[in-house]
Image (cartoon, grey):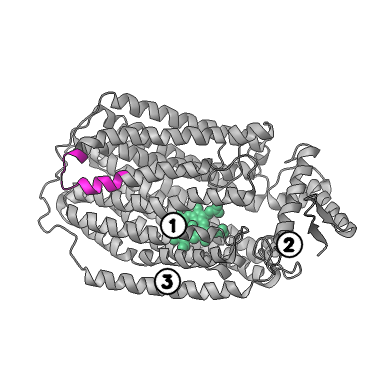
């Protein structure tokens, strides 16, 4: 080994030949990220504007990082024959090949998945209790619902949700477009002011923001509706939280722009700019602000719910579950504050996944289950006792796989092999309940047809059916596609990740956000008769668009990349050389079809939501 660690000085000692190589690689990257005209074509292919790095000092630091990161991937751990990154990324020339353990734990995880499915099938067969209420009411039990001032005050949250959806999708379109046009948007030199790193960051951040806003608003709306009590100053609290959220959204996005454009020093960048950790990119100040905001939300919701919890109604247990899921969502965001500016990458990644994974594969799943169950119980379509039992069961199943399942993000981050083994095993268990989402979808579809009056809720309920569908396809199937160690070893960082990311994050939680929004909007004016056409078009376009985007473009690109990664190494699968081959170019262009249908869906949705306010989505009384 030419590179070693000197235990006395803790310096890395590098042979002169290697030093020369590092120097060469460094000057390649300096040319690429700064303004070497010879690298213009490559910059275009990667979507990196000239002078992305604006001074030599920062370039040196970045090169030092590249060196260190590469070093960690090829250097064997003391006394072991695997590298710090568990031999990832695959690259035969660099000596990185998968170890036998990857195959072993891949096989084991598949067996565990089958066992999990078997167990659940048995459980469902044995508990075929009919969840639907036979004597569901003939008129909507909510028809007497009185809107309190704070409930009305949540309406503006949904306008913001709708506006953010549009901006988020626009950012996605721009980001996807950069992958084929490099630095422009149909000829406009857009990358000068909105480079890929920003459009992509905003695309992800906005997704989290609008999904969260919709859920928060739903919580604020239903809490006083359930208890029938409007605590003092509740409306003021709801309005205050709204302003705080707006400041966080605008402030953090602006900070990220300033960070990427290097208008901030490195310390300010950590606090107000762009941390660079996907999904928790926002500066530390904004993170803390959001954390406080989430607790304010809990407080507002808790105080409105409290009378209902105290009243010991039959809904009580479901309400407590709802509150616990909400507390967990707020509290686990706190894990995002566990790293500092200089924390080791492996440690920061560990905590980052506490937030991202434990949210989406843990408490969000619980929240989704309990909130949907609760809405049906309120409509008296499902019995409270049965809903409570099934929510409890779902919680146990989700969390028993989901918690240790976090380790599937840590296979290659310097962890011992046991972490890979545990991660592969427990995350396979997560897929078992998702395989049964067909039950959920069918059940919800049946509820939407239970009684004549339920038809008014058809489209909100259809979005819940979509939640179940994408839980199966996006989280279950496409999650498991990349999940076994040997799969992720070759696929990490390829288009297979956005296949899963889009179908799971938008498919499950985005659809839930839209469904909840429509539910609340429905309850806000039960006398209005909706013109359903735009919302119907929105529903089908969003779902079909998402499916096509993935099936005819992103997935085939990801699979072609996987083959390239197995054959030649990960570097080749991600290289401009490979991605610009004619087949890959065509496949990438095909995205336009799905993306366009999807975008049309979002425009119809916005048109519909704003039409509820201005009247064009409501049928005039005959
Ligand atoms: C609705 C539930 C889920 C959502 C919303 C979701 C979302 C996501 C997102 C957005 C990422 C990308 C993170 C990043 O690159 O920083 C991701 C990564 C990943 N997800 Fe999920 N996920 C869900 C469920 C699952 C399930 C059930 C599995 C499999 C058991 C799974 C396995 C993975 C794996 C292995 C990665 C890492 C991919 C990589 O590093 O290349 N996910 N997930
Ligand atoms: Fe995960």
Q: Residues within 10 Å of mark 1 (few under 14, many from 20)?
A: some
**Which residue shows up at 33% across the image and 37% down it?**
611
Residue beneath label 3, please?
A: 113
Disc number placed over residue 403 in the picture, else none: 1
Q: Is residue 231 visible?
A: yes
Q: Quadrant of residue 581?
A: bottom right
Q: How far across and how far down the image is residue 501, in percent?
A: 50, 55
Secondary structure at numbered mark 3: helix
Q: How far across and how far down the image is residue 232, in percent?
A: 26, 24
Q: Magenta stretch? A: 309-323
Quarter of the image containing the N terminus? Answer: bottom right
Mark 1 vs 3, N-terminal side:
3
**Residue 314 shown in magenta:** yes
Task: Tell me, yes or no, whether the two marked residues, 2 and 3, touch with CB atoms within 8 Å.
Answer: no
Q: How far across and how far down the image is residue 274, in percent?
A: 61, 38
Is 247 left or right of 494, judged from the image as shown? Answer: left
């Amino acid at each position: 080994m030419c590179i070693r660690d000197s235990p006395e000085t803790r310096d890395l000692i590098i042979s002169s030949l290697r030093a020369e190589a590092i120097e060469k690689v460094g000057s390649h990257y300096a040319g690429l990220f700064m303004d070497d005209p010879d690298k213009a074509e490559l910059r275009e292919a990667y979507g990196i504007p000239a002078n992305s790095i604006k001074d030599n000092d920062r370039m040196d630091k970045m090169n030092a990082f590249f060196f260190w990161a590469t070093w960690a991937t090829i250097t064997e751990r003391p006394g072991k024959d695997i590298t710090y990154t568990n031999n990832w990324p695959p690259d035969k020339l660099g000596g990185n090949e998968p170890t036998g353990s990857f195959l072993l734990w891949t096989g084991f995880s598949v067996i565990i998945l089958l066992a999990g499915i078997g167990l659940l099938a048995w459980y469902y067969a044995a508990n075929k209790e009919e969840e639907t209420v036979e004597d569901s009411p003939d008129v909507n039990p909510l028809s007497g619902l009185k809107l309190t001032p704070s409930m009305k005050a949540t309406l503006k949250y949904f306008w913001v949700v709708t506006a953010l959806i549009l901006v988020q999708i626009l950012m996605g379109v721009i980001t996807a477009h950069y992958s084929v046009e490099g630095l422009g948007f149909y000829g406009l030199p857009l990358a000068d002011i909105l480079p890929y790193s920003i459009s992509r960051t905003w695309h992800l951040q906005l997704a989290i923001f609008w999904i969260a806003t919709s859920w928060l608003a739903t919580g604020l709306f239903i809490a006083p509706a359930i208890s029938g009590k409007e605590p003092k100053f509740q409306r003021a609290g709801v309005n205050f939280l709204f302003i705080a959220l707006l400041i966080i959204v605008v402030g953090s996005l602006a900070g990220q722009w300033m960070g990427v454009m290097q208008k901030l020093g490195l310390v300010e960048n950590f606090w107000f700019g762009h941390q660079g950790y996907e999904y928790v990119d926002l500066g530390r100040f904004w993170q803390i602000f959001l954390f406080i905001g989430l607790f304010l939300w809990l407080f507002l919701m808790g105080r409105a719910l409290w009378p209902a919890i105290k009243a010991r109604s039959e809904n009580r247990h479901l309400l407590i579950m709802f509150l616990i899921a909400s507390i967990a969502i707020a509290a686990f965001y706190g894990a995002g504050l566990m790293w500092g500016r200089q924390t080791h990458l492996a440690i920061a990644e560990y905590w980052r996944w506490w937030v991202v994974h434990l949210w989406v594969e843990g408490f969000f799943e619980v929240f989704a289950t309990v909130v949907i169950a609760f809405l049906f119980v309120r409509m008296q379509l499902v019995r409270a006792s049965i809903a409570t039992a099934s929510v409890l069961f779902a919680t146990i199943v989700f969390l028993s796989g989901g918690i240790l399942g976090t380790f599937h993000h840590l296979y290659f981050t310097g962890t011992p092999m046991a972490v890979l083994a545990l991660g592969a095993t427990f995350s396979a268990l997560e897929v078992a309940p998702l395989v049964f989402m067909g039950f959920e979808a069918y059940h919800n579809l049946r509820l939407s047809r239970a009684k004549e009056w339920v038809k008014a809720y058809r489209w909100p309920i259809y979005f819940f059916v979509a939640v179940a569908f994408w839980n199966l396809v996006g989280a279950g199937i496409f999650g498991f596609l990349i999940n076994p160690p040997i799969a992720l070893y070759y696929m990490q960082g390829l288009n297979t990740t956005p296949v899963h990311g889009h179908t799971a994050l938008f498919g499950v939680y985005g659809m839930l956000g839209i469904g909840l929004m429509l539910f609340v909007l429905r309850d806000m004016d039960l006398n209005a008769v909706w013109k359903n056409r735009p919302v119907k078009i929105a529903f089908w376009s969003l779902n079909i668009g998402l499916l096509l985007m993935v099936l005819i473009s992103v997935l085939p690109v990801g699979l072609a990349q996987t083959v390239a990664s197995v054959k030649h190494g990960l570097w080749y699968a991600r290289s401009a050389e490979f991605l610009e081959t004619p087949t890959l170019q065509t496949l990438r262009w095909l995205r336009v079809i799905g993306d366009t249908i999807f975008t049309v869906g979002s425009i119809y949705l916005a048109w519909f939501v704003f039409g509820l306010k201005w009247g064009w989505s409501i049928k005039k009384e005959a």
